[in-house]
Amino acid sequence: MELIFHKSEEYIDEDIFYYISDQRDKHSMIKPKKENLISMTVDSEKLLPPSKNEITNVFYPFKKNSIDKIYIGLSFPLFSNNWAASYLRYLLKVIKKENGSIILPVYPEEQANEKGMWSRSFLENIFTSRTGWTGKNNVWAENDGVMSMRIGKNFPKKPDSTLNFYLDEIGNQFYRNQLNGGNKESKEIIKNIWLTSKYSSIVEKVIQDKFQKNNIVYADICDDSSLAFEVSVSDYISVKKTIICTDDDSLYDDLLNYFSYRSKNDFTLLSKSKLQALDKYQPNVVSIINNKNNDEYLEAITKLLPKTNIIFYGTFSENSEKFSASYDISIYSTIVASKLETGKTINHYSDIIEEEINLEKDNSLAKMYLLTPK
């Protein structure tokens, strides 16, 4: 069985063409036959096994050692962070041990760093499993813009990520039983897992651009604490203390228990009703992303912590002038982890996605903003 993963159905044709064109694979090393591919998407509502008859969700819990090849489409939102490394490691267990492979697009170093996507060196730093030229590697160079992953000499170590919490603690068999019944609660869990993947990569990139690897205090105001934990255990930034402002004590406790012996990070729970207590922690960065009303908390934080950097998801509408008087405001793409700058084009292998990115700054949709105090 050969699968190809997409963001949504509108990208299927372009994703498939990327792998079947002679330009990408002149020697037919990894080229699939179009008729053999089964498409699955991130946003499908059908939590069912792969099927030629319908488009199902990529987060269906596959059996181990069951899939011949998995192609990662250009549109598939797989950033180069701990979450995605955990996901690729999970897929290595899904593909067949003998001759199974994961094929994915990679970018030149500068482009990969700009967009938070995978390059050859990023993959090899995490997944290389041989010493020198001895033994079979997890990562194989194929052709320009394409790498493949297979079961190598040593299985890669598990990165710290909330994805592993969901895979390990909840369990694939539990998911399989629930998803086959179309469980609505499971669909919401999967939606939040994917949002954590996307938003964590963007928040990490903002912090990288602002603080590099310097130690920071980070706070997140949220309905779901998965994002805060994902950012805090990232290998790409250095968070020394995390304050999570949420009223969902149950999920916080579960994640805290999971990371208690995996991470040395210092986590603190704070109720949303006690935001004033944030003042004593003086966080370097506060993110306001995953709430029913982000605007409410933005107003509160600008008054409480006027010297703190704020990462905000939403729309400013008529309030933009009020904030621009006190803050320098930058916009980050919600499609790739890149800062959007006037006059600068962000390139992408996908023509559709490239156009979406470069129109994103001027559209009327919710955006990811960085507010830097003047």
Image (tube, rainbow, N blue to C red):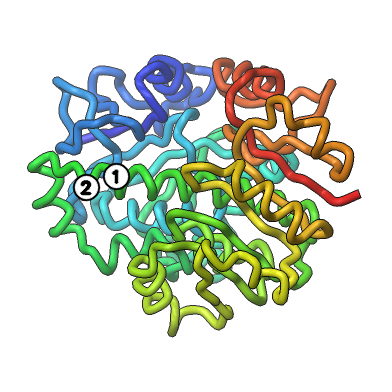
**Who's the residue at 33% across and 51% down the image?**
91
Label annotation for residue 126: none
- Picture quarter containing residue 161? bottom left
Vertical side of 207 occupied by 275: above or below:
below
Disc 2 is placed on an element classified as helix
Q: Residue 117, percent across and down?
A: 60, 42
Q: Residue 321, percent across and down?
A: 82, 31
- Picture quarter containing residue 221? bottom right
**Who's the residue at 86% across and 51% down the image?**
373
Residue furthest right in the image? 374
Q: Is residue 307 visible?
A: yes
Vertical side of 160 occupied by 16: above or below:
above
Q: Is residue 248 left or right of residue 348?
A: left
Residue labelled with disc 2: 185
* Frontmost residue, 138 versus 215: 215
The three-letter amino acid code for the residue at tag 1 is Glu
Q: Residue 352, percent across and down?
A: 55, 16
Q: Is residue 29 left or right of residue 240?
A: left
Q: Gap between marks 1 and 2, in whole Å?
A: 5 Å
The three-letter amino acid code for the residue at tag 2 is Glu
Callouts 1 and 2 close, C-beta under 8 Å: yes
**Who's the residue at 29% across and 61% down the image?**
167
Q: Residues within 10 Å of mark 2 (few under 14, many from 20)?
A: few
**Who's the residue at 45% across and 34% down the image?**
76
Disc 1 is placed on an element classified as helix
Q: Residue 50, percent across and down?
A: 18, 34
**Which quarter of the image is occupied by the N terminus?**
top left
* Frontmost residue, 210 versus 148: 210
* Frontmost residue, 149 versus 76: 76
Residue labelled with disc 1: 188
Q: Residues within 10 Å of mark 1 (few under 14, many from 20)?
A: few
Q: Is residue 128 visible?
A: no
